[in-house]
Amino acid sequence: MPPSDALAANETPDYIPGVTPPQVRVVLRRRLTLWPLVMVMFFSVSGGAFGLEPAVSESGAGLTLLLLLAVPLLWSLPVGLMVGELSTAMPVEGGYYAWVKKGLGPFWGFQEGWWSWINSFIDMAIYPVLFASYLDTFLTRHAGTAAVGEHEWLHWVVTLVVIWPLTWLNVRGARQVGFVSLWFSLLVLLPFLALSAIGLVDLVRDRPAIWQPVVAEDTPLLSAFGLGLFVIMWNYLGWDGPSTVLGEVHTPRRTFPRALTLAVPLVVIAYVLPVVAGLTAVPGGAAWQDGAFSDIAEAVGGAWLGVWLSLAGMVSAAGLFAALLLSNSRLPFVLAADGYLPPALTRLHVRFGTPVLAIVLSSAVYSIFTLSAFERLIELDVILYAASLFLEFAALIALRRREPRMVRPVRVPGGMAGLVLVSLAPVAVFALAVAGTVHDTGWASLALPVAMLASGPLLYPLLRATVKRGTRDVPVPIERLP
């Protein structure tokens, strides 16, 4: 085994029922290094400023700029601190699923894994659909044909052309996904860098009031705040996602927190600068609609920049799918390892040592969901993700109390008071977002996410009595100070 694949000292391989020790070492081949991991994180959370446009039109330019700067401090930073502590204390395959199971017990661990996986059914189907939509827009504007959008079967074929090559990339391993994410990120960030440079020069020269309107016209402040906050939160979700492949990260106790430290400011900059630059040429208003960044880029820099952003949109959608498939496909794998799903899902590819059936199953589900005619359900995404995230914060606090001597190379500062403050900040942000949405659309908007959350407690006893039938959970190894 090459040195880069070897398990670092004190990194115990996970036990997987029915898998021989040599195969365990293969599945935990630690080949995902720092910069590829940074870019996996970038695509797990961002993929560029695409998707921020509705915040400007629905909330107002000033409020959007404020939220873009405030949400990282109240949401991303606390999540990053929590993930930093738990990922270095328990650098195991399954990541947040294993943390919650260790901290709160098997019942809540199952809810964490199940909620995250079913949420991915809708979330992951968005990105191939977005790719097909970007392609259709590009062909309509620059080739004079709208064939992709006119034929539903062709639209679906395009989504499959995105899904299955990236599925094969995932089967080949986390290292390959990391390197492709690195190249994809360059292809996405370069046109946004050009847009930002041109726009900032115009900002310094002309000094337009880019913050106007502060709040969208004819929109109550609370509604504007709630709508914008959900959009911004949705664009900052996912810092814990890559933790599910911690067992495949090279020296994770050092690499993972370093990657977080680099990825968080990268994402903030990749959001703020393009929005500021775009507002210099296109004031906040109805023009800022979903998918409008290519038009905004054309207004800032000319037709060439609009074309470049259109192509970057397709690359971004592909990069998001590849990186998120990497993390989401490990959820059925670890659930099966604990006996909640059929044991065949723990089967590894004989050459690449990846959970091939779990990856293929996830992609098959996502392929079906791309057929659905649904709008981007940002509220659903945020609510399901927040429920899982709050379990992770609860596990963080519980493990501090129950395992005070657990080795923690990274610690949330401030003792128990610091933990509570770090945990309360995301809860407060989420509560404000929900309050704004309920004020605007009523309580009915919460019905679907509540039903999806309820499926976990209902399924847990059924799966324990049928599929699991006494299979013991995979132990989560920890180290304790002497």
Image (cartoon, rainbow, N blue to C red):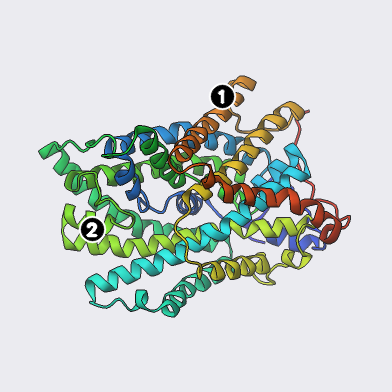
| Residue at which label 2 appears | 295
Q: In which quarter of the image is residue 481?
A: top right
Q: What's the residue type where badge 1 is placed?
A: Leu
Q: What's the residue type where badge 2 is placed?
A: Asp
| Residue at which label 1 appears | 421
Residue located 39% across and 56% down the image: 185
Residue located 17% across and 54% down the image: 299
If you read the primary sequence from the N terminus, does the residue marked by circle 2 or circle 1 appear first? Answer: 2
- Nearer-the-camera pick, 385 or 193: 385
Percent across and percent down for residue 107 are 77, 45
Residue located 54% across and 40% down the image: 257
Percent across and percent down for residue 187 are 34, 60
Count how many numbered circles sit on residues in the image. 2
Q: Can residue 92 be seen in this view?
A: no
Q: Helix, strand or loop at disc 1?
A: helix
Side of 126 relative to 55 (left or right)? right
Q: If the image is split into quadrants, where does the C terminus sit?
A: top right
Percent across and percent down for residue 381 are 52, 50
- Nearer-the-camera pick, 147 or 79: 147
Report, in whole angstroms, how far the alpha carbon at label 2 lies from the one at label 1: 42 Å
Side of 160 relative to 293 (left or right)? right
Percent across and percent down for residue 234 are 46, 46
Q: Quadrant of residue 2?
A: bottom right
**Mark 1 surroundings: few (<14), some (14-19) or many (≥20) residues within 10 A:** few
